[in-house]
Image (cartoon, rainbow, N blue to C red):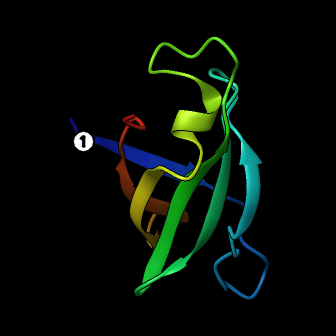
């Protein structure tokens, strides 16, 4: 199941989109996500997972894609894309 997802960010005064690449930790589920450029946007992969994640052991989830097709939406000042739960 694919879910719509949004990353909201503050834009500098010149209107350039922020670059989301790097390691990010999710607030609610404890995942660490590695965001990197892919195609014309950004994708995110599980880089760490909570020990008691319901989808399996952390080592089974790491490396799985969680975010895809994130592109900058200049009208709403946010990154829009798709999110998918990691599958084992």
Q: Residue at x 41, y 87 (%)?
A: 40
Name the spot of residue 18 as percent of width and height, x first: 70, 74
The residue where tag 1 is placed is 2
Nearest the viewer among 33 and 71 is: 33
Exactly how many numbered labels are in the figure? 1
Side of 69 relative to 23 (left or right): left
Q: Quadrant of residue 77?
A: bottom right
Quadrant that contains the N terminus: top left
> Which residue shows up at 35% across the image and 42% down it?
84
Q: Position of residue 38 (x, y in %)?
A: 47, 80
Q: Between residues 36 and 70, which one lies in front from this camera angle?
A: 36
8 lies left or right of 24: left
Residue 74 in view (yes/no): no
| Residue 63, above or below 38 | above
User: Which image quadrant is residue 69 in?
Assistant: bottom left
Quarter of the rendering containing residue 13: bottom right
**Is residue 51 visible in the rendered structure shown here?**
yes
Whole-percent x, y for residue 48 in the image: 70, 39
Point 53% across, 37% down: residue? 61
Given the current orientation, which residue lies at the most extreme left position?
A: 1
* Label 1 secondary element: loop
Q: Is residue 53 left or right of residue 87?
A: right
Q: Quadrant of the C terminus?
A: top left
- Front residue of this view, candidates 27 and 62: 62
Q: Is residue 26 above or below residue 54?
A: below
Compared across the picture, whether 88 is left or right of 13 comes to: left
Q: Residue 47's spot in the image, x, y percent?
A: 68, 48
């Amino acid at each position: 199941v694919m879910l719509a997802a949004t990353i909201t960010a503050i834009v500098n005064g010149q209107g350039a989109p922020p670059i989301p690449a790097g390691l990010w930790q999710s607030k609610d589920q404890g995942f660490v996500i590695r965001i990197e450029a892919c195609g014309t946007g950004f994708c995110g992969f599980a880089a760490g997972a909570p020990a008691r994640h319901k989808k399996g052991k952390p080592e089974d989830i790491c490396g799985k894609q969680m975010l895809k097709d994130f592109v900058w939406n200049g009208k709403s000042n946010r990154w829009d894309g798709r999110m998918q739960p990691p599958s084992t």
